[in-house]
């Protein structure tokens, strides 16, 4: 299992809170002032999924690919609606260049699989003593695709194409990135609307949480408040990270316990999903009066966000956004490049069904920005042993240029705008 930021934060949030008198608001918060704001969120419908398949098939034809093989995960949700965990029992979707997809399922799991299947599809099953990749090969042979290249979605585990290569020796196995990325990187208005709703939930949860942060609260206490507010507002929390003081000097924190005190800096990085689509917003607060040094760095990060936003021009290489920020930071004496104090991570990442998905705003990325692409904008500055500041807002590319999902804050004195 890969230890991601989201798994780290979920594990921390699952720890029980100590309901000492000073922390009752964190242990058992009063959520009565909040209401679900996601009731008008429109889920992805059958027409949208049909357009996705048509787009994928057009890209397959353009790249000479006969079919694409997909495992459980966000791409399976994207194309079929199926929500499924990965195990040693393979469940697979085969997207052919023409006609309906095929779902290859363990026999005893077929009824449960159909509960989330959201597209017309042929279903072929395999028994416990059978080879599921032989079933895939049989489908491709029946569709007269056995001699054409098969695209493998980039997160598929090695044993699956390795077995398919033995079952289908006449087919060349290739990357499905031109097809899957070609579809998923360009968000439709329906997807963008869901991402906007998820962002609205996160911003509303921040406003509620920040008012209730008190001296003596731990990082886990604050994260739990944020998660509770997110749920009440209608979102499903993905991560609610809170970093106090020196912990904020490290982008994903440290194991050293920290508690809020008067004048302490608090960096929060939080996101949720609405109908599977994600938000990702970071804010840096100070409880009380900010020092001159913290204020200076906060203002520089705010300027860094604006530099990135201005550099996000249609047709520009995605890496040029990161280059513009890093050049400005180096003029201020940070770095160079990823050296600290400075910006030790990329300026931003793609976002959609996954919190992190291709492509990234990072040096060397040549993919050109196009309408429908969505990114985080988070050029933090970190001073090891002291503190760090990160402001993060996501944006999407339109025909007129970039557009924010959430407006960046104006000043450290108005950290939520």
Image (cartoon, helix red, strand yellow):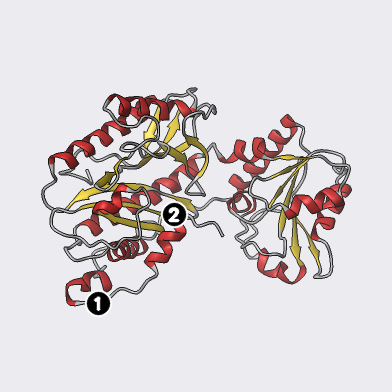
- Tell me what residue is drawn at x 40 percent, y 31 percent: 337
> Quarter-wise, where is residue 334 in the image?
top left
> Quarter-wise, where is residue 90 in the image?
bottom right
- Tell me what residue is drawn at x 70 percent, y 69 percent: 111
Q: Visible in this render: residue 237?
A: no
Which residue position is annotated with label 2? 5
Q: Would you place residue 1 above or below residue 191 in this image? A: below
Image location of residue 46, percent across then percent down: 61, 50
Disc 2 crowd rating (10 Å Cα; few below 14, some 14-19, many 20+) is some
Q: Is residue 184 left or right of residue 360?
A: right
Q: Is residue 158 left or right of residue 235?
A: right
Disc 1 crowd rating (10 Å Cα; few below 14, some 14-19, many 20+) is few
Observer-nearest residue: 382 or 349? 382
- Tell me what residue is drawn at x 82 percent, y 48 percent: 165
Marks 2 and 1, how far apart at CA: 26 Å
Q: Would you place residue 19 above or below residue 297 in this image? A: below
Residues under numbered marks 2 and 1 in contact, where contact means CB atoms less than 8 Å apart: no
Image location of residue 295, percent across then percent down: 17, 40
> Quarter-wise, where is residue 244 in the image?
bottom left
Image location of residue 284, percent across then percent down: 25, 47
Which residue position is annotated with label 1? 19
Q: Secondary structure at mark 1?
A: loop
Q: Is residue 144 left or right of residue 223?
A: right
Image location of residue 293, percent across then percent down: 17, 39
Observer-nearest residue: 247 or 394? 247
Q: Residue 294's mark?
A: none
Q: Secondary structure at mark 2?
A: helix
N-term-proximal mark, 2 vs 1: 2
Observer-nearest residue: 323 or 71? 323
Q: Is residue 187 left or right of residue 145?
A: left
Task: Tell me the quarter of the image containing the N terminus.
Answer: bottom right
Task: Tell me the quarter of the image containing the C terminus.
Answer: top left
């Amino acid at each position: 299992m890969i230890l991601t930021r989201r798994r780290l934060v979920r594990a921390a949030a699952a720890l029980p809170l100590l309901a000492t008198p000073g922390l009752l608001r964190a242990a058992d918060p009063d959520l009565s002032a909040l209401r679900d704001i996601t009731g008008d969120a429109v889920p992805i419908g059958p027409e949208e999924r049909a357009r996705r398949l048509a787009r994928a098939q057009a890209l397959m034809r353009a790249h000479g690919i006969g079919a694409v093989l997909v495992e459980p995960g966000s791409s399976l949700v994207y194309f079929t609606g199926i929500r499924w965990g990965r195990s040693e029992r393979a469940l697979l979707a085969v997207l052919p260049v023409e006609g309906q997809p095929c779902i290859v399922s363990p026999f005893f799991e077929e009824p449960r699989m159909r509960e989330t299947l959201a597209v017309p599809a042929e279903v072929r099953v395999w028994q416990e003593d059978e080879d599921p990749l032989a079933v895939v090969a049989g489908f491709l042979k029946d569709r007269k695709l056995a001699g054409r290249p098969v695209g493998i979605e980039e997160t598929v585990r090695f044993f699956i194409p390795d077995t398919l290569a033995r079952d289908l020796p006449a087919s060349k196995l290739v990357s499905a990135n031109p097809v899957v990325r070609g579809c998923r990187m360009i968000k439709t208005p329906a997807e963008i609307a869901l991402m906007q709703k998820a962002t609205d939930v996160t911003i509303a949860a921040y406003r509620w949480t920040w008012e209730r942060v008190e001296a003596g609260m731990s990082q886990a206490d604050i994260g739990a408040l944020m998660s509770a507010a997110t749920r009440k507002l209608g979102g499903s929390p993905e991560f609610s990270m809170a970093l106090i003081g020196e912990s904020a000097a490290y982008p994903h924190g440290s194991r050293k316990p920290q508690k809020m005190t008067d004048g302490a800096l608090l960096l929060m990085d939080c996101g949720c999903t609405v109908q599977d689509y994600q938000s990702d917003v970071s804010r840096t607060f100070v409880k009380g009066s900010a020092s001159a040094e913290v204020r200076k760095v906060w203002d520089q990060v705010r300027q860094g966000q604006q530099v990135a936003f201005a550099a996000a021009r249609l047709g520009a290489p995605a890496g040029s956004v990161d280059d513009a920020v890093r050049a400005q930071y180096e003029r201020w004496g940070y770095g160079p490049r990823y050296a600290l104090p400075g910006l030790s991570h990329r300026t931003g990442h793609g976002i959609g069904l996954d919190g992190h998905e291709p492509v990234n705003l990072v040096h060397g990325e040549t993919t050109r920005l196009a309408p429908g692409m969505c990114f985080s904008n988070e050029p933090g500055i970190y001073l090891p042993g002291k503190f760090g500041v990160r402001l993060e807002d996501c944006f999407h590319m339109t025909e007129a240029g970039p557009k924010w999902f959430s407006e960046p804050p104006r000043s450290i004195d108005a950290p939520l705008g």
